[in-house]
Image (cartoon, rainbow, N blue to C red):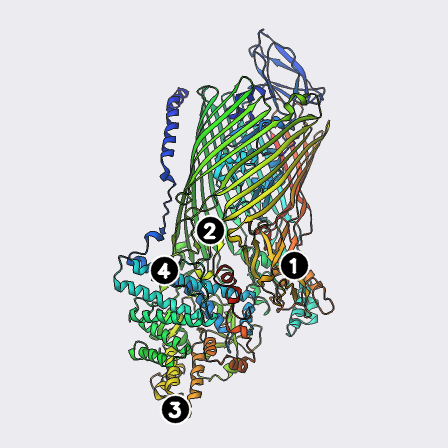
Amino acid sequence: MKKISALIFLASISFGISTDTLAESHSPSYLQDTVPQRDSIPPPAIDQTDGAISGTIKDTDDNPLPGATVQIKGSETGAISDDSGNYTIAIPADQKGVVLVFSFLGFQPKEVRVGNQASIDVTLISDDQELDEVVVIGYGSTRRADLTGAVAQVRTEEINAFPTSNVIQSLNGRAAGVQVIQNNGAPGGGVSVRIRGANSIQGDNNPLYVIDGFPFSGNPTNLNNADIASIEILKDASATAIYGSRGANGVVLITTKSGSGSGTVVEFDAAYSVQTLREKLKLMNGSQYAQLMNIQAQNDGLAPYFTEAEVAGFGEGTDWQNEIFKQAPIKNTSLNISGGGENTQFLIGGSIFQQDGIIKGSDYERYSIRSAINHKISDKFKVDFNSTMTKLVTARRDSEGGSRGNSMIGAALGASPLSRPYLDNGTINHLADDFPFVSPDMINPLYFINEQSTVISANVVLANAAVSYNPIPDITIRVSGGVENRDDRTDNYRSRQFINSNGNASITTSQYISRLNENTITYANVFNEKHDLNVLAGFTYQDFTTKFLAGSGAGFLSDLYETDNIGAAETPGIPTSGYSSSTLLSYLGRVNYGFANKYLFTASFRADGSSRYSEGNKWGYFPSGAIAWKVSEEDFMKSQEAISTLKIRSSWGQTGSQAIDPYATLNQLFPGYTVFGEELYNFLAPGSILPGDLKWETTKQFDLGFDLGLLQDRIVLGADYYIKTTDDLLSLVSLPSSFGYTTTIDNVGSIENRGVELSLFAQILSSEFRWSVDGNISFNRNKVLSLNDGQPILTNFINVIAVADNFSIMEEGKPLGQFWGYQEDGYTETGNIRFKDLNNDGEITEADKTYIGDPNPDFFYGFNSNMTYKGFQLDLFFQGSYGNDIMNVSAISSTMDYGQGLNMPEEVLLDHWTPQNTDAKYPRISRSSTARVSDRFVEDGSYLRLKNILLAYNFPLKNAQGKFLKSLRVYASGQNLLTFTKYSWWDPEVNSKGGDDRLGIDHFSYPIPKSYTIGLNATF
Amino acid sequence: MKTLTNYRLLNPKLLIAGFLAIGGIVSSCDSLLEEKPKTIVTENFYQSKSDFDAATNAIYFPLRMVRSEQVAILSAHTDWGYGRGSRAQYNDFQGFNPTNINAAAERWSGFYEGIRNANIVIEKAPLSEELTEDEMNSYSAEAKFLRALTYFDLVRNWGGVPLRTDQNIAQKDVPKSTPEEVYAFILADLADAELYLPTGASAPGRPTQWAAKTLLADVYLQLEEYGMAKMKAQEVLDAGEFRLVPIASVDDIRNKIFGAALVTSSEEIFSFKFTRQTGQGNGLPWILNHPSTGLYNFGGAYAHYGDATNPFHKEWEEGDLRKGLWQLVDFGLGDSTIVNGKYAEPQAVDNTGAGNDIPVYRYPELLLIFAEASARVDGLTEENLEALNQVRRRAFGLDPGTVSDKDYVLEELTSENFLDLILQEKAYETQFEGKRWLDLKRTGRAEEFLMKNKGITIAEKHYLWPIPLEELNFNEAMSPSDQNPGY
């Protein structure tokens, strides 16, 4: 349970947004009566002519709230409380029965209908009082207090705490059980999210993202952080089973901002950041490099490459890291205009996000326009419409991985400091020719930056409309239709100046469209004031169609064409196109029953039919059930004060994963070309994957948890224990290569994740100086329970020339992604690495490989502190991971591949094996030194980092009422400014290969930057 | 008014009716879940003639893709060739390091992908109801030729290997066969190929009866069945289908025999074909050339080179145009470094986009196969000496059919040194065609020549390439003891 402290100063964010709307449209009717901010007072009996109402506004600790706003709902008339929290507001004679809205930053707004009283005192409840807030769940919403499942909420102020190119990056460290792994630091680069561990080998293990009810195609890159009202993360099966075959990895429900009914609010946010490489690697300079080359020559019986005088004269040489990295800005601007009245609310928003990458030439831009309209047609009809149009443009410079400097990042580390970046005539220096000992693979990284471009341009439209009908107040029928359309186009151009190129262009476009129709009926009622029933039933249809078209050309007379005239190519490429489609049909139902507001029961069911599975296995059934006991509502708890809230929850359920692609069970033939004479002839052949008859992956999950609030919920503790088992695990299974197929997909086994999640919130001080802290920590233990025939599966084959081997293993009883390699045992007499002969057969063979590391963390955590004093705010946000290993594949090329003219860390020169230094860190510098996948490359990847530090000042616009500017906040912040880690390479937050059986690999990846940000939030 | 209109549209009865209607449609349409891919699936393929054209063409692709590496590596395993960088290890003759073990596994996979595609044709052709018997035999024969050629490559480099056939196509685990079993299988395939392949290819790059006979002759030579080898070679000679391409200069070799723009030549018996197209070109020219020679439009990787001080090169007679394909280029490994420009390509589309074909059998090699087989059966004769002399004359730019002063003379030779001359001539003639190492192994003279020309002792483990780990790990009919010696 994630606890958020909504402190003051979130002026940029309007809170009124969705709580009302959601409560009305989805919540059981009793909720509206108990939602605390809505004190309903009977209509006035007496005319109040020229009235004025006065009173005092206080917080729950009885402290007066100066500067709070009182406003007549739907009008411009308003007042501000004085230093003692007192206010007086004039009520025009013709406005009887008006509603007053009391609001103050960081507190939940409260509405009071004016009756015949002359004085109204109100107590505003801090936003920190989490248990009464409304939480979005699948196909509905509920009060947090009535949740039976494990649901975490991340709120808008956390999402907007610092600029991220992807909304999901802002979840990192914010919610227990939610691990956010940034695969690399490229702008717009991939992010992996694991909720309660990874349960699939074949599937991608990322949660289902649902944006305003629409199950989205993946990471919500179409949204700007400022678009989002809240994010709910459904973790246990009782919460996720309603998403059936897509629920096994958890579900992230994203609610965007919508209009409110109380006048027009204009919010403007702007931020500017500067990003830099966190830390350069300490590589050899020119002289040191020449020394190392000479040592290698000597050890390999060659004449020295350089004379002593030359070595001394080389000095620093070229710093290639300076050649590719730069300081890079992020500009983020958004404007949201929202408003409306009783029957119609609207929001129109737009944002521009522009991020340059710290590698020259890379950038990411997002332009988006959003609108949301809610309209009440009559008492019985409502219509909602929500749409987002986004343009994303990504310029990639992501030549990563590789070996011997054949990738941009590899070359930035491996290029000789004695080589110049450019020749005198301004052309790029061809490094492989500079010295005879330099590997022919070495490519000047500037080729990738200046002479090759990859631009991905995507237009994404997400639109969803719904009509709700209440034939009687207890029944809501809702029919919605939505569409996600994504058109993207990738342009690759390699110029004539690139090494070995006479111009290469390729263009790939794809069109993805997903259509959704959802039909639900909800019945909600309270019987005899004790039995609270809410029943949901529905059926949904969603289809997914992708088409692509690709064309290319090689050989251009001029670089002017780039990708815009592939017809001008000397050799036009063969065009390709493709089509893939799948359908998901579902029936769903859920019953929530509450007895006496003490005992809560939930049961849900979903049947999913997917076209992707083979005949007879198309339908999957996903039930769940949960119970909760609100102990604190029992009479015996009323006599004490310490425990303000206590709820014990437990749930069980089954979810699934659509881990396979469309057509994976069909014996498809793939086309290609071969040559006779000089002509192309087409052919058809099976692919390299042998199709199989596949069943669904099914995940069963048990959850036991409690929520405990102490001292009027000034301290809130949440804890969950869960155990998840996934059966019929789909996995690629290797086949003997002589079979002609390299792999097949099979339901090979089962996997388990079990763990504990804890979260804590404490409001330490709540006087003028307010201080709250919150934190969360998650322990997940992943274990492969069984594999087909009990045979281990070797995975993660990586070839960096010096080493080419399977780096990981999947084996029963072990977590996914175990590193698998050799143990080192010092050096031989000649300075070669000695490996342990574990089976004592006198030879080092495959049989001597063993477990050498585990990329799964023992635990990961986030810790947040918010302090405010008068207008000042200081936030500190720490985030970290402990006990995870990183396989530093970069270091294989960079520290062990001698004789290739590669530059290396200074350490290699200073501490390598010589007859005088036999316990050196690195072996003898010789091209006959051999490396294997060994424990030397496995490093502790634990880290603790100051993810964000923020200092803000909120201008005291005390008499803002009626003035143009209502609030103004300025801030300065820093991201990733401090990192504590033992990891030797650029950054411990790295995951080059993305997948879970290939977790924790660092292979010449685009590093994550640190950044400094200044910004402002203004409300008009 | 507008609100009213909307309201009518949203008449509750209509809405409920719509709600139910959609439910009805959805629930009654399980056919929505049927997959209708816009691709061809196996189940309804392999019927018509065009199906089998497409299926047979599929055999070539993987075999073409592994060919340039196969040739390059076999050329480093010689007494005259050297590899650079990671390829340097190939000419150490001490077996393979992990890098090269992996590279060998990739070639293995490529060969077996070709065999799988051949097996599909051989299995499915007899089942088709649309093919005539002749068509069925012809597709099977083409597939069997390619399968035999591939097993010949496998068995000579790896020794015994699993025999994947059209009979065990669905079987994941297949044990390793002995070399004898593999050769028997090759001979059976070639018997069919010889019988049913056409005498003239429908397109350059498809096998003919003559290609099958040439391959048979080579297999018999390998099996030391010299009589059969001579007979098969003789049949090709007698057919008179091929003749040596006359040349007058080094450039003629580059352009008229191995030229990038050449479609075929009068001496081509069987080649893997490439064209100037991304993904369809030959990678070998880029691997071999050096930028300074200007023979490849993207420079070249000069990953393989020679040494002018190597006795093989020093003893090579000046005036032999084939020697002129080597040029001195000092790129840092010494001033006697030479680089080969046999495969020139001025208009490649990229590094792997050269139009040059990779010859598998050319007529000069057939002449030398004949000469050797004949000499081993009948001793030195006018006829087999003439076969050798034709190859030699052409190499000096002379008319192959006319007696010249470069001729070896019968009286000056013995049967023994005649065999030496044939072996040497073949080494000159087929550089970078992947022949020399296999000939040295076959004749048992590898040790002798490596010591003589490179001063190297060959490790026992170097004679057979390692079986890929993926094979030993995942083929349950094989065990680690099936691995070749030394790995």
Q: Split into 4 quadrants, where in the image is the N terminus of chain B?
A: top left
Callout 2: chain: A
Residue at left offset 54%, top offset 54%: A792
Q: Are marks 2 and 4 on the same chain?
A: no
Q: Residue furthest bottom?
A: B411
Labels 2 and 1: the sequence-earlier one = 2
Q: Residues within 10 Å of mark 4 (few under 14, many from 20)?
A: many
Q: Residue furthest top?
A: A46
Secondary structure, mark 4, is helix
Badge 2 amino acid: Ile
Q: Residue A901 shows which numbered tag?
A: none
Badge 4 amino acid: Ile
- In the image, which is nearer the foreground, mark 1 or mark 3? 1
Callout 3: chain: B
Badge 3 amino acid: Leu
Q: Which residue is mark 2?
A: A745
- Residue A142 sits in quarter: top right
Badge 1 amino acid: Arg
Q: Residues within 10 Å of mark 1 (few under 14, many from 20)?
A: some
- Residue A520 sits in quarter: top left
- In the image, which is nearer the foreground, mark 3 or mark 4? 4
In three-dimensional space, the C-alpha distance between marks 2 and 3, rounded to whole angstroms, equals 65 Å
Q: Are marks 2 and 1 in contact (CB under 8 Å)?
A: no
Q: Which residue is mark 3?
A: B410
Left of B156 or right of it: where is A769?
A: right
Secondary structure, mark 3, is helix
Callout 4: chain: B
In three-dimensional space, the C-alpha distance between marks 2 and 1, rounded to whole angstroms, equals 33 Å
Q: Are marks 4 and 1 on the same chain?
A: no
Q: Residue A936 shows which numbered tag?
A: 1
Q: Are marks 1 and 3 on the same chain?
A: no
Q: Residue B120 shows which numbered tag?
A: 4
